[in-house]
């Protein structure tokens, strides 16, 4: 049995006075507990892609990401487990100037490197062109045949994997909440949601452009919507209130949240509950998509900026 054949995930009930006051039940699907590095949606997104890479006879995977990318680390570790070489094309050529120093300051890249990933650091300008045919041909010349995984890992097979997040037991929930980057995870959840359920996506970045992309992956008539009020200024942006919420939530529930994705979603869920945006007696399932490995690197940034803040 391979690692990808088994994912034992529990729904943990959250206890908080606001929930009893509003007569709402909230559960967290602890996908984050699947694995420390291949957690949450990364496990789901990689499962069928790694299988396809192996079935199609590839020995190497190439993918893309930023310096603290959950996807980069998960691909490195999962590729290693599956016996596939991995190459990460990383945004920011300056990171490649002194790789020893980069690895000493960046736990995400350090762990990916230890997992066997080879890096190529490229400029932000080249990074924007990464999916065009000229860039991909250059990669093929240098690396030979490879299985291409897009940034964030979202493609049809990733969505198929994310369709396995909800199970038959989850039909009791009225709302399913999930954070959104590219929207692949949300699309998988929508595809397996039942008609009586409403799926809410909480984008971690600014802009309403995601709706169309998500629709392209949706093959189900379940009701869904994007809640765009909780991006906190954009990707990797934060406020003191968000950090305090994440730390309070962990102290009260023992559930850790990351500041880039799941913290923003949970902040949004609680804010909507406070504002009576869920009907009484509602049962909500919030999907914890992992990303906890990013906390250490995020705290390094907070420290460098001398903010006095820390995610615990
Ligand atoms: C921890 C975590 N949660 C959620 C997401 C968003 O997933 P998606 O890109 O499928 O919307 C990501 C994306 O990288 C992530 O790392």
Image: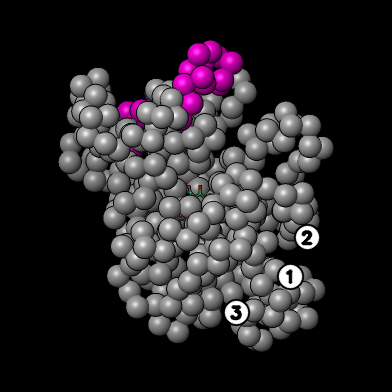
Q: Which residue is mark 2?
A: 252
Q: Position of residue 226 (x, y in %)?
A: 50, 67
Q: Nearer the viewer, residue 295 or 7?
A: 295
In the rendered structure, does residue 85 fall within the stretch colored magenta? yes
Q: Secondary structure at mark 2?
A: helix
Residue at left offset 33%, top offset 34%: 130
Residue at left offset 49%, top offset 35%: 66
First along the sequence among labels 3 and 1: 1
Q: CA distance from mark 2 to mark 1?
A: 8 Å
Q: Which mark is residue 283?
A: 3
- The reply to whether residue 168 is in sight is no
Contact between labelled residues 1 and 3, with CB atoms less than 8 Å apart:
no
Contact between labelled residues 1 and 2, with CB atoms less than 8 Å apart:
yes
Residue at left offset 43%, top offset 78%: 223
Magenta span of residues: 80-103
Q: Residues within 10 Å of mark 1 (few under 14, many from 20)?
A: few
- The reply to whether residue 236 is in sight is yes
Residue closest to the far left? 56
Q: Which mark is residue 15?
A: 1
In the rendered structure, does residue 16 fall within the stretch colored magenta? no
Q: Residues within 10 Å of mark 3 (few under 14, many from 20)?
A: some
Residue at left offset 43%, top offset 59%: 210
């Amino acid at each position: 049995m391979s690692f990808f054949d088994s994912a034992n995930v529990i729904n943990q009930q959250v206890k908080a006075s606001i929930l009893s006051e509003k007569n709402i039940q909230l559960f967290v699907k602890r996908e984050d507990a699947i694995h420390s590095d291949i957690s949450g949606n990364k496990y789901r997104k990689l499962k069928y892609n790694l299988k396809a890479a192996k079935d199609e006879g590839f020995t190497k995977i190439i993918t893309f990401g930023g310096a603290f990318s959950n996807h980069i680390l998960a691909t490195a570790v999962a590729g290693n487990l599956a016996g596939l070489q991995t190459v990460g094309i990383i945004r920011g050529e300056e990171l490649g100037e002194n790789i020893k120093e980069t690895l000493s300051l960046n736990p995400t890249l350090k762990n990916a490197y230890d997992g066997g990933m080879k890096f190529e650091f490229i400029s932000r300008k080249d990074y924007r062109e990464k999916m065009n045919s000229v860039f991909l041909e250059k990669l093929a010349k240098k690396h030979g045949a490879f299985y291409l995984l897009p940034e964030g890992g979202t493609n049809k097979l990733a969505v198929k994997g994310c369709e396995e997040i909800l199970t038959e037991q989850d039909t009791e929930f009225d709302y399913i909440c999930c954070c959104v980057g590219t929207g692949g995870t949300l699309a998988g959840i929508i595809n397996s949601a039942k008609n009586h359920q409403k799926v809410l996506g909480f984008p971690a970045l600014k802009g309403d452009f995601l709706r169309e992309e998500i629709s392209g992956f949706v093959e189900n008539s379940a009701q869904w919507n994007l809640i765009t009020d909780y991006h906190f200024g954009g990707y990797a942006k934060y406020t003191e209130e968000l950090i305090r919420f994440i730390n309070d939530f962990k102290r009260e529930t023992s559930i850790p949240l990351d500041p880039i994705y799941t913290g923003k979603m949970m902040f949004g869920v609680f804010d909507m509950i406070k504002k009576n945006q869920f009907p009484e007696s509602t049962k909500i399932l919030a999907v914890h998509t992992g990303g906890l490995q990013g906390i250490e690197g995020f705290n390094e940034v907070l420290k460098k900026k001398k903010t006095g803040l820390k995610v615990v």
